[in-house]
Image (cartoon, rainbow, N blue to C red):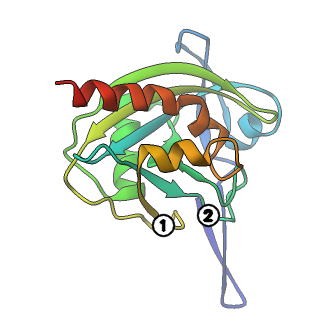
C-alpha cells in the first residue's frame, strides 16, 4: 500500500509496482510480474492467502474493504487476504498479512483449500486457511473495520453484493469446517 499526503488529504492506493510471483496451476513458480500487470487484465496466475478467523461460538470475522481499494471496494471480505510477495513462502505471507491486517500472531492455521479464482481483471491461486481464536482481531488502518458475523448473517448476505465474490466462492468450505468443529 502507498500513502500519499496531498493538501493534508490522505490518498491511499495499492502499490502497482509491487513484484508478485507468477505460478502455474500446481502453484509452482514460473516467473514474476508487477501487481499492476497481475491486476491489469493479463490474467497472470498469482498466489494469495486468505485466513478465516473463527471464534469459539462459530462466528466468522469479516473485514470491510476500504473504498480506496482498486478491487471490490467497500465490500465485506475474509478476515485476512493478501498477496504472496515474490520470494515469500505461503506460510510466511499468511503470518505477515494476518499481523498487518488484524494484529493476530501465534495462531494455528488449518489449510482448507487451494483453488483458482478468475475475475474479469485477474486470476489468483487462493490458499484458504482457517483458525479458531479467543482473541479479538484488531483491524489496521488498511481496513475499514471488521466484526464477527454469524453463519446466518453471512447466508443472508450472499448474493446481495455486500460480500466479495472471493468470499462467496469459498464460504461453504468455512461453514463445513465450523460444522466439523461442532461435531467434535
Q: Position of residue 6 (x, y in %)?
A: 71, 83
Front residue (pair 138, 97): 138
Using the rendered image of the protein, determine whether residue 89 is visible from the camera's viewpoint: no
Q: Quadrant of residue 183?
A: top left
Is there CB contact under 8 Å for labels 2 and 1? Answer: no
| Residue at the disc numbered 2 | 66
Q: Is 157 left, or right, of 139 in this rendering?
A: right
Q: CA distance from mark 2 to mark 1?
A: 8 Å
Q: Quadrant of residue 182?
A: top left
Residue drawn at (49%, 19%) of the image: 114
Front residue (pair 154, 26): 154
* Up/down of 169 relative to 115, above or below: below
Q: Position of residue 85 (x, y in %)?
A: 51, 37
* Up/down of 51 relative to 1, above or below: above
Q: Residues within 10 Å of mark 2 (few under 14, many from 20)?
A: some
Q: How many numbered marks are there?
A: 2
Q: Position of residue 24 (x, y in %)?
A: 61, 12
SS at mark 1?
Answer: loop
SS at mark 2?
Answer: loop
* Up/down of 45 relative to 72, above or below: above
If the image is split into quadrants, where does the C terminus sit? top left
Residue drawn at (46%, 52%) of the image: 62
Q: Which residue in the rendered view is the most extreme toward the bottom?
A: 8
Q: Residues within 10 Å of mark 1 (few under 14, many from 20)?
A: some
Residue drawn at (38%, 38%) of the image: 94
If the image is split into quadrants, where does the N terminus sit? bottom right
Front residue (pair 182, 123): 182
Q: Position of residue 56 (x, y in %)?
A: 22, 46
* Up/down of 178 relative to 164, above or below: above
| Residue at the disc numbered 1 | 145
Q: Earlier in the sequence, mark 2 or mark 1?
A: 2
Amino acid at each position: 500500500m502507498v500513502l500519499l499526503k496531498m493538501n493534508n488529504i490522505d490518498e491511499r492506493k495499492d502499490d502497482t509496482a509491487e513484484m508478485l510471483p507468477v505460478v502455474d496451476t500446481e502453484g509452482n513458480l514460473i516467473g514474476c510480474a508487477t501487481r499492476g500487470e497481475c491486476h491489469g487484465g493479463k490474467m497472470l496466475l498469482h498466489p494469495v492467502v486468505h485466513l478465516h478467523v473463527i471464534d469459539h461460538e462459530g462466528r466468522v470475522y469479516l473485514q470491510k474493504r476500504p473504498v480506496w481499494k482498486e478491487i471490490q471496494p467497500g465490500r465485506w471480505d475474509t478476515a485476512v487476504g493478501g498477496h504472496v510477495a515474490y520470494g515469500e513462502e505461503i506460510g510466511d505471507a499468511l503470518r505477515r498479512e494476518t499481523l498487518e491486517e488484524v494484529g493476530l500472531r501465534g495462531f494455528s492455521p488449518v489449510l482448507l483449500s487451494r483453488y483458482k479464482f478468475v475475475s474479469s481483471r485477474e486470476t489468483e491461486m487462493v490458499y484458504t486457511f482457517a483458525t479458531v481464536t479467543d482473541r479479538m482481531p484488531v483491524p489496521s488502518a488498511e481496513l475499514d473495520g471488521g466484526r464477527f458475523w454469524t453463519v446466518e448473517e453471512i447466508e443472508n448476505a450472499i448474493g446481495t453484493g455486500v460480500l466479495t465474490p472471493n468470499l462467496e466462492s469459498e464460504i461453504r468450505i468455512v461453514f463445513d469446517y465450523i460444522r466439523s468443529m461442532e461435531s467434535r
